[in-house]
Amino acid sequence: KTKERKPYKFLTAGKFQKNEYEEDKKKLLEFYNSEGYRDAAIVSDTLIRDEKGLALRIKMDEGPKYYFRHITWNGNYLYDDKTLANVLGIKSGSPYSKEILDKRLNYNPTGQDISSLYLNDGYLFFTIDPVEKKVEGDSIDIEMRLSEGVQAHIKDINIAGNTKTSDHVLRRTLRTLPGDKFNRELLIRSQREIATLGYFDPEKIGINPVPNPVDGTVDINYTVVEKPSDQVTLSGGWG
């Protein structure tokens, strides 16, 4: 967000905001990391004031560009190495990127990820920890350490925030039912189904799974915020 003010663009930001600039420095390093520059660092940044205003000078140390080499798996029993490698989709020789690695492990909005493979089949207590085992030259070896846990089943479903809308109106839209295996994908679909009712603020529909490791169950808590009556009528009419 830290930009130069252009004389011919009146809406271009030009005022220096320290808080925004500190966030921008983090984004700058994240960009380098996503391109394979794992060791990139800001050596110095200087803010200079003169008769023309402010000048900002940033000195970078990009460091070498790294690549994924060997990716191994440890602790997986439900799926073999080949299956997990296909889901991960990171080939040897690809630029090393923590951002891509995190998406492929935890949440990939454009495709499947390792966590979804387990969480959509009930393995709520699943964990995975990528560990850099070896850094040699420009290559990095990663070991994926998994703990699969046991399948969790849904125990109770609780709904809060609906002061005018009856519980059964929401419950009939849910894809998650007591006794079913936990499924992250169905939770997301349930959230969308609630939003299509038109009675609630879609940005404030909350889902909070509460695991019970002792008995291997999970409670699902949904929270909603109802729209004002005039907004509900309008959305229903246009719908």
Image: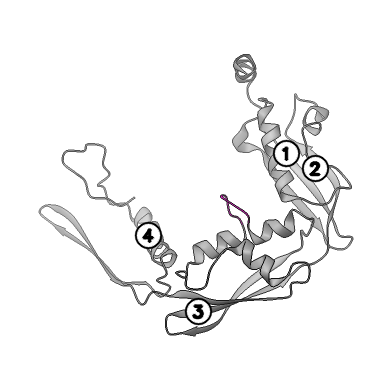
Secondary-structure class at tag 2: loop
Residue that badge 3 annotates: 140
Characterize the local packing of mark 3: few (<14), some (14-19) or many (20 or more) Cα atoms within 10 angstroms.
Answer: many
Characterize the local packing of mark 4: few (<14), some (14-19) or many (20 or more) Cα atoms within 10 angstroms.
Answer: few
Say if mark 1 contacts mark 4, CB within 8 Å: no
Say if mark 1 contacts mark 2, CB within 8 Å: yes
Nearest to viewer (mark 2 / mark 4): 2
Say if mark 4 contacts mark 3, CB within 8 Å: no
Characterize the local packing of mark 1: few (<14), some (14-19) or many (20 or more) Cα atoms within 10 angstroms.
Answer: many
Question: Residue 159 location in percent, x, y?
Answer: 78, 38
Residue that badge 1 annotates: 190
Q: Earlier in the sequence, mark 1 or mark 2?
A: 2
Nearest to viewer (mark 4 / mark 3): 3
Residue that badge 4 annotates: 22
Question: Residue 126 location in percent, x, y?
Answer: 74, 64
> Separation of disc 1 and disc 4 at Cα?
38 Å
Nearest to viewer (mark 1 / mark 3): 3
- The quadrant in which residue 162 appears is top right
> Separation of disc 3 and disc 2 at Cα?
41 Å
Judge whether 203 appears above or below 152 on screen: above
Amino acid type, label 3: Ile
